[in-house]
Amino acid sequence: MTSHKNRLRGLAALGALLLATAAHADIKVGIDLSSTGPAAVIGITSKNAMLMWPATIAGQKADYIFLDDASDPGAAVRNIRKLINEDHVDVIVGPNITPAAMAALDPVAESQTPMITLIGSASVVEPQEGKKVWAYKMAQTDSAMADVMTRYMSNHNVKTVGFIGFADGYGESWLNEFSKFAALRHIQLVATERYNRTDASVTGQVLKLMAAKPDAILIAGAGTPTVLPQRTLIERGFKGPIYQTHGIATPEFIKLGGKDVEGTLFPTQPVVVARTLPADHPAKKAALAFANDYEAKYGAGSVTQFAGDAAGVYPRLQDAVTRALKTAQPGTQAFRVALRNELEHAHELVVPNGVVNTSAKDHVGLDQRASVMGVIKNGKFVYLSQ
């Protein structure tokens, strides 16, 4: 009898130990952002949104570890290697910029650590093979944004376009995607120019664009460096419509651009124009709730698409971690693999910037419900119907 009681006590103690272990298995989230440098306007709003995340994920205590890469791809890789090798994180969130995300593919694939990026370009997740199977992406793809933009151009009689974009992966991706959809809609690309994020002048490029006499001009960049070519176009007398990409949707763009950016046309995601979205938009409730919460904390007019993307990471993790915990415990390779696999199984998951349906072939999961046209009107981002 005593032996039986001892065995029961032993089993109870073991059960309590296992429960305690499970309860105290923190989920470590390594976060690399561009909080300083040219892309800081993106990284800061991303971090602001993440500071609003709950303290637990799927009932497990979450440990959020933030590092700044100063908008430098080399620093981003060093940060991510540190997060993986020293902090032993279960998942990487970030980077904010395309060159950094592409460079990060090596360390995340080597360590079998899933990465949820916050970049615009689809190049980090397409095609889904090799190292890219470890990468996911929150923002809508350039392809989907180019689709909605060129559809609007076509509907408004734009026949010819001049292009000026970043001389990096972001600009390259946009040129490729825009060219495809422009051709589909019989829009001719009549001039193509590039510039660097840190350039102080783009006068030469702008004069070449204007010499081609396009109906409209597309500036393919992100953050405040996109103001420079637009201001130069206005100063040189360009009178046609100016389009920008979804990378501009920050209050800093409007503040820095002032009257020169009034009337800018751009594709975007629901959070940026939450208050003016149609009532029947499937993401309006989530977009509006986040926009209200964010602006209550950080000020009226402060919400950005990048903040919305960052906010959407949490429900993505909550959804996938809930299932991954049935397979393994955080802090193990088995859990990282399970989490990567479960991130592929989001189904009709509503996030502030759209509705997510992922698969083994699609690590973005957003459809056209995450793409809308916007315009800057009276210093505000406003929804624009097709």
Image: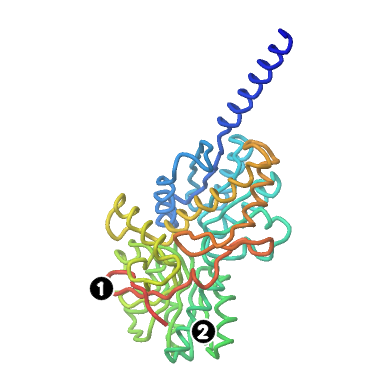
Which label belongs to residue 179? Answer: none
Give me the disc on residue 191: 2
Looking at the picture, how far across and down is residue 281, in whole percent? 42, 71
Q: Judging from the image, what secondary structure is the residue with disc 1 in?
A: loop
The percent position of residue 279, horizontal first and vertical second, equals: 37, 71
Please report the residue visible at 73 percent of the width from the left and 13 percent of the height from the top.
4
The residue tagged 1 is: 378
Q: Is residue 222 above or below residue 294?
A: below
Q: Quadrant of residue 29?
A: top right
Along the viewing direction, whichever of 195 and 339 lies nearer the viewer:
339
Give the SS element for disc 2.
Answer: strand
Query: Is 166 left, or right, of 257 in this rendering?
Result: right
Kindly give the residue lying farthest to the top in the view shown: 2
Q: Quadrant of residue 141?
A: bottom right
Quarter of the image that includes the C terminus: bottom left
Foreground mark, 2 or 1, reads: 1
Quarter of the figure with residue 88: top right
Mark 2 or mark 1, which has the lower sequence index?
A: 2
Q: Is 357 above or below relative to 293? A: below
Quadrant location, the N terminus: top right
On screen, residue 126 above or below 34: below
Q: Nearer the viewer, residue 156 or 286?
A: 286
The amino acid type found where label 2 is placed reads Ala
Residue type, mark 1 in image: Asn
How many marks the image carries: the answer is: 2
Q: Is residue 197 left or right of residue 178?
A: left
- Residue at 71 percent of width and 46 percent of height: 110
